[in-house]
Amino acid sequence: MATLVLDNGAYTAKIGYSQEKVSVIPNCQFRSKTSRLKTFTANQLDEIKDPSGLFYILPFQKGYLVNWDVQRKVWDHLFGKEMFKVDFADTSVVITEPYFNFSSIQESMNEILFEEYQFQSALRINAGSLSAHHYFHTKPSELCCLVVDSGFSFTHIAPYCRSRKMKEGIRRINVGGKLLTNHLKEIISYRQLHVMDETHVINQVKEDVCYVSSQFYEDMEIAQMKGEENSVMRDYVLPDFSSIKKGFCKPREEMVFSGKYKTGEQILRLANERFAVPEMLFHPADIGIQEMGIPEAIVDSIQSLPEDMQPHFYQNIVLTGGNTLFPGFRERLEAELRSLAPAHLPVSVLQPANPICYSWEGGKLLAHSPDYDEIVVTREDYEENGHCICEEKFDI
């Protein structure tokens, strides 16, 4: 029996058989400006000749799976003969869902997995639980870990003890990659160039030039300097999709500080945007979101847990999700936690080599673990007992 692990994120789906490697695929459909009628699904994104003004059709809204028609199309594509060629009668699936998912969504998902696709068995689990499983697998001596998962829709902080999640300590901050990209679009549109329709391009800009500042106010002052003294400023060459397929950052030595470029490329000049955008993960109040930043939320989460466990959580904080890839993210988080945590407790923040696929790897490990067969729900179980057997078995 094959096991398919699907970490079904709101931005990308991380999918692969438990014997094989993972593929990261956009979990959405696209329409391009040029061919309005044709819809592209998932990794057909590469076929679009001109991705300017790319229109996203997302299955997730505010972090929850609400658009089933789109999700079905993406899954049909992933499970179909072009991609994973799933033989449903002989396949078990591990699929992720967000914390505190709505039961109506859970029922729809059970129905689609068992009745439409007819998987042999299924395990529905939080991505953070897979990350925790991965962490405990690599560090068997540890009893506790705190998973910080900063994704597309929001950032979750979830404490685990002996691989059981501690619900009372879970915190959610409504800041994720989608918000950061949208905010960057607004700033650039206001300051230099109308890019409100260019989600795809600006998302790439964000990934290429943004970083987390360790001294915000000092960087702000540098960003206001003129000419060469301004070490924060970068010129980003926008793609024109004919000669420049993908945007890139101009090397420092090629930057023209006064006057115009002769080369005729379209340039975005970015200074304080580079660190002011990721700063929202640490201070959502900057843009009027009245919530805690990640460091405060971590401390708040840990303080809600039994006192003798708290030191273990401070020492085992693991970062997952795409936002943790901003340069300087781990260092800043560790520094802020150090100043907020009790002085006698050591603080350690671990960033895995690939934070995006960390929970998928955890799912892969789980699929090979000896008690895997006991935690799944088989199709016979489901046909006999319906949705309630899933509620009993899945720790959601």
Image (cartoon, rainbow, N blue to C red):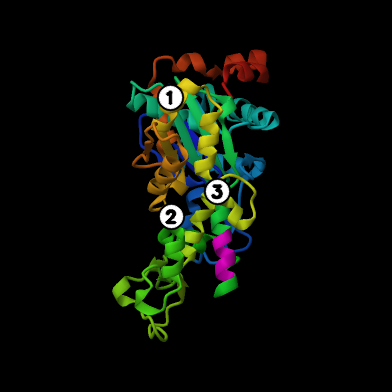
Gap between marks 2 and 3 measured at Cα: 14 Å
First in sequence: mark 2 or mark 1? 1
Compared with 301, 13 (above or below) is below
Image quadrant for the N terminus? top left
The three-letter code of the residue at mark 2 reads Val
Task: Indicate left or right for 206 with 227 as reference.
Answer: right
In this rendering, the label closer to the viewer, 3 or 1: 1
At a point 38% along the width and 47% down the height, the residue shown is: 331
Task: State which region is magenta.
Answer: 183-189
Residue under pointer 1: 144
Task: Indicate left or right for 212 with 64 as reference.
Answer: left
The residue lying toward the viewer, choosing from 102 and 372, is 102
Question: Can you give x and y, in whole percent of width and height, for residue 32 in the image?
Answer: 57, 62
Task: Indicate left or right for 84 with 108 as reference.
Answer: left
At a point 36% along the width and 24% down the height, the residue shown is: 137
For mark 1, does the 10 Å Cα neighbourhood hold few (<14), some (14 to 19), or many (20 or more) residues? many
The three-letter code of the residue at mark 3 reads Gly
Residue under pointer 3: 176
First in sequence: mark 2 or mark 3? 3
The three-letter code of the residue at mark 1 reads Cys
Compared with 83, 143 (above or below) is above
Do residues under tags 2 and 1 come within 8 Å of each other at their CB atoms?
A: no
Whether residue 70 is visible, yes or no, is yes
Question: Can you give x and y, in whole percent of width and height, for residue 248 in the image?
Answer: 39, 66
Query: SS at mark 2?
Result: loop
Residue under pointer 2: 212
Query: SS at mark 1?
Result: strand
Gap between marks 2 and 1 measured at Cα: 27 Å
